Amino acid sequence: MAKKSVASLQTGSKRLTKAIKMVKSPKTGAYTFVESIMAPDDVNDWLNKN
């Protein structure tokens, strides 16, 4: 499962997006959240990456 945050971050002339991905641990089965700030074009690639 993955969730893209609604808020966009703007720093100077660059537009950035904060993406949050829920990752299941193979050892314990618990879910953790991984956050990353990137360009809006890269979000889908990052979310689909295993």
Image (cartoon, rainbow, N blue to C red):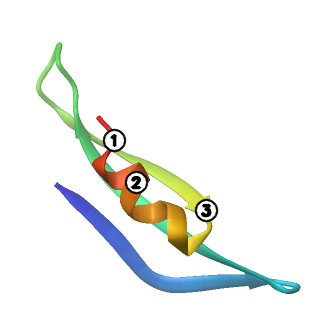
Residue 38: mark in rendering: 3
Earlier residue among tags 3 and 1: 3
Q: Residues within 10 Å of mark 2 (few under 14, many from 20)?
A: few
- Indicate whether 47 appears above or below 29: below
From the viewer's perspective, tell me whether residue 47 is left or right of residue 1. Answer: right
Pick out the residue farthest to the top: 27
Viewer-nearest residue: 29 or 17: 17
Q: Which residue is mark 2?
A: 45
Position of 41 relative to 29 (above/below): below
Q: Name the element at disc 1.
A: loop
Residue 49: give its label. Answer: 1
Q: Amino acid at mark 2?
A: Asp
Mark 1 surroundings: few (<14), some (14-19) or many (≥20) residues within 10 A: few
Across and down, in percent, residue 24 comes to: 19, 34
Amino acid at circle 3: Met
**Quarter of image, res 13:** bottom right
Is residue 15 shown left or right of residue 24?
Answer: right
Q: Are marks 2 and 1 in contact (CB under 8 Å)?
A: yes
Foreground pick, 50 / 4: 50
Amino acid bearing label 1:
Lys
Question: Which residue is found at the position 16% from the left and 32% from the top?
Answer: 30
Looking at the image, which residue is at 42% across and 51% down?
46
The residue sitting at the right extreme is: 12
